Image (cartoon, rainbow, N blue to C red):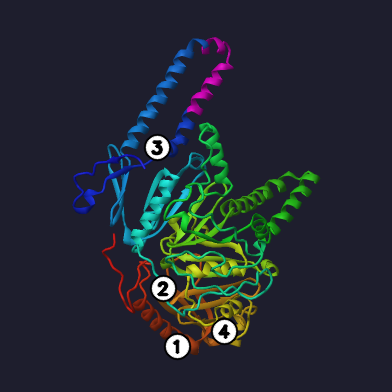
């Protein structure tokens, strides 16, 4: 972080003692590089046009001093403007706020309350990534979009600041799981499953569990987990011979970064305490993308393009090419986003790192998880693969960008991988047989594990899935399963239920069924329960509202690191 800037006169109290910090000096150039390229491209194009005109070479020779001088003048002006912009860009983190101010003639100051911070993400677009810089994004409750963006900081500084802000927002104390609480086990042997032993409890406290602690065992190719990080005494991955040149050091760091090493080294309190619980091998990622509907639609279209080209019918080619290119772009976007995906557990929640060209480091605090969905598309079923998505507070608004992508907790993995992720997101399933809940939710179609299925009259509305879709209630979550070919299992913590409603159309009323919807934070996970028997829907609404009230009174997971001193103890609010 750069030198401090004296606080303005408007600051007062304890916050006035916190100095302002400046972002990296390269920030204005990284934000405005496109404008620079456009300006020089336009000037260079005019110069080249004049060069190839009659007597152009002679005119260029005469104008060369003016061209060079003008270019240097424009460059000096751009540098001066960007330097002034950098001087007026600063930020600070106080015990209660994250504040950012910028602007020379028109001042702009934004702040985010730490008790409203939902998540702190690190984004590393390609160009800043090559320079070893990162961007911090703060998601705030009801913000609608990223409330604050710190562009750009050194990678190590960004990681250290993320750890500090999350600790302040979370209460800065650890919350250990109570004794005797069942946690998600890895399901028994099945297609693509590693046959892992039951998962142990995953307390978000003194020691972050690793894959062996979570019971994610088996062959590395099955569970997709990588080796545990080296001990804290291990040299940083970027530490090399001091005699190497700056260019060689940059090339080595960039290569190690794109190979998946931590660009920030081993930051104390940050990356050094995390343990990898799931990784997505490249082969599995490619296979999962190919086993979707898109490639199977694009393949016949590509064959049609070849056939139309062969017979010489051009209009048909022009009509189909955009469709094929759009499908390929979608596949590349998913591959680029999920490349190198790894999930790690640490004291502040689930840490996700992924991305080929643009790297993203996200931290998902368990206290912000509103609903979780395990999905198994029908083409994945022979391999036993599942994906995990979640509705996260602060990510649900459409203005927040790639909501679906940022809600991915695991793009593809085995049931053991999914169970390891669930152990962090929802550490207490509230049932003595969590494995049975997972198996019945994804593979079953009966009333085992307490599932209440749709009545037979619902076959008119859902002829394929009526016998499988249903719900069950545990002490901690409401589980909903849907789908026949592609299968979904949705888990909603009771304390995250903000409201419920039952809807009946005229046909559903005549069939004696209703659709029950749970209101939670918006996101890609659908929390509706289709075709519930009308006689059951009323009791479900009353019971779930009572469970939600009781759970909300019992647990305050907004400060997810705050230790409880006893039953019903409240988190301290004076933690700095």
Q: Secondary structure at mark 2?
A: helix
Q: Which residue has dot 1 on it?
A: 539
Residue 74, how many percent across, how many down?
41, 24
CA separation, marks 4 and 1? 19 Å
User: Could you classify mark 2 by the number of other residues whose Cα lies within 10 Å: few (under 14), some (14-19), or many (20 or more)?
Assistant: many
Q: Residue at x 33, y 59 (%)?
A: 168
Mark 3 vs 4: CB contact within 8 A = no
Q: Nearer the viewer, mark 4 or mark 1?
A: 4
Q: Nearer the viewer, mark 3 or mark 1?
A: 3
Frontmost residue, 505 versus 341: 341
Q: Secondary structure at mark 3?
A: helix
Q: Secondary structure at mark 4?
A: helix
Is 69 within the magenta? no
User: Could you classify mark 3 by the number of other residues whose Cα lies within 10 Å: few (under 14), some (14-19), or many (20 or more)?
Assistant: many
Residue 327, how many percent across, how many down?
64, 53
Give the quarter of the figure containing the C terminus.
bottom left
Q: In the rendered image, is residue 453 in sight?
A: no
Q: Which residue has dot 2 on it?
A: 496
Q: Residue furthest bottom?
A: 535
Q: Which residue has dot 3 on it?
A: 28
| Left or right: 485, with 177 as reference point | right
Mark closer to the chain start, 2 or 1: 2
């Amino acid at each position: 972080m750069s030198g401090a800037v004296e606080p303005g006169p408007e600051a007062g109290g304890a916050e006035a003692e916190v100095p302002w910090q400046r972002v990296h000096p390269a920030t204005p150039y990284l934000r405005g590089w496109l404008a620079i390229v456009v300006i020089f491209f336009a000037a260079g194009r005019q110069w080249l046009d004049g060069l190839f005109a009659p007597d152009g070479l002679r005119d260029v020779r005469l104008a060369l001093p003016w061209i060079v001088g003008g270019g240097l003048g424009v460059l000096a002006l751009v540098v001066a403007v960007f330097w002034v912009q950098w001087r007026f860009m600063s930020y600070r983190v106080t015990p209660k706020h994250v504040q950012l101010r910028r602007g020379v003639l028109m001042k702009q100051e934004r702040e985010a309350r730490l008790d409203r911070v939902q998540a702190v993400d690190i984004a590393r677009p390609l160009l800043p990534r090559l320079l070893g810089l990162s961007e911090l994004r703060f998601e705030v409750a009801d913000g609608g979009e990223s409330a604050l963006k710190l562009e750009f900081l050194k990678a190590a500084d960004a990681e250290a600041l993320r750890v500090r802000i999350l600790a302040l927002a979370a209460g800065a104390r650890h919350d250990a799981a109570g004794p005797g609480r069942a946690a998600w086990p890895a399901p028994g042997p099945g297609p693509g499953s590693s046959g892992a032993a039951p998962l142990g409890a995953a307390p978000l406290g003194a020691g972050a569990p690793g894959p062996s602690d979570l019971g994610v065992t088996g062959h590395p190719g099955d569970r997709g987990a990588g080796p545990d990080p080296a001990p804290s005494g291990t040299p940083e991955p970027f530490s090399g011979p001091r005699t190497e040149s700056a260019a060689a050091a940059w090339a080595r760091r960039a290569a190690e970064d794109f190979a998946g090493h931590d660009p920030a080294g081993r930051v104390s309190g940050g990356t050094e305490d995390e343990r990898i619980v799931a990784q997505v091998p490249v082969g599995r990622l490619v296979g999962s993308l190919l086993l979707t509907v898109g490639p199977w639609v694009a393949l016949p279209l590509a064959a049609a393009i070849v056939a139309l080209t062969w017979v010489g019918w051009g209009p048909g080619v022009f009509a189909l090419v955009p469709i094929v290119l759009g499908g390929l772009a979608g596949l590349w976007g998913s591959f680029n986003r999920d490349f190198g995906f790894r999930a790690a557990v640490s004291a502040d929640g689930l840490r996700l790192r992924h991305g080929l060209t643009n790297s993203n480091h996200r931290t998902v605090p368990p206290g912000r998880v509103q609903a979780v969905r395990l999905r198994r598309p029908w083409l994945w079923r022979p391999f036993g693969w599942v994906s995990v998505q979640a509705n996260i507070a602060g990510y649900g608004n459409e203005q927040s960008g790639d909501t679906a992508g940022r809600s991915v907790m695991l793009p593809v993995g085995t049931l053991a991988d999914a169970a390891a992720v669930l152990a962090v997101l929802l550490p207490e399933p509230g049932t003595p047989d969590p494995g049975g809940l997972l198996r019945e939710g994804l593979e079953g179609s009966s009333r085992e594990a307490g599932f209440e299925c749709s009545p037979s009259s619902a076959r008119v509305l859902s002829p394929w899935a009526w016998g499988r879709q249903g719900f069950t209630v545990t002490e901690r979550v409401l589980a909903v399963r849907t789908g026949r070919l592609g299968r979904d299992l949705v888990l909603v913590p009771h304390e995250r239920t903000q409201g419920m409603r039952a809807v009946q159309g005229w046909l559903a009323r005549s069939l004696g069924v209703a659709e029950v919807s749970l209101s939670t934070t918006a996101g890609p996970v659908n929390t509706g329960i289709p075709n519930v028997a009308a006689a059951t829907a009323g009791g479900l609404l009353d019971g779930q509202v009572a469970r939600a009230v009781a759970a909300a009174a019992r647990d305050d997971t907004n400060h997810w690191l705050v230790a409880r001193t006893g039953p019903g103890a409240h988190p301290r609010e004076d933690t700095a």
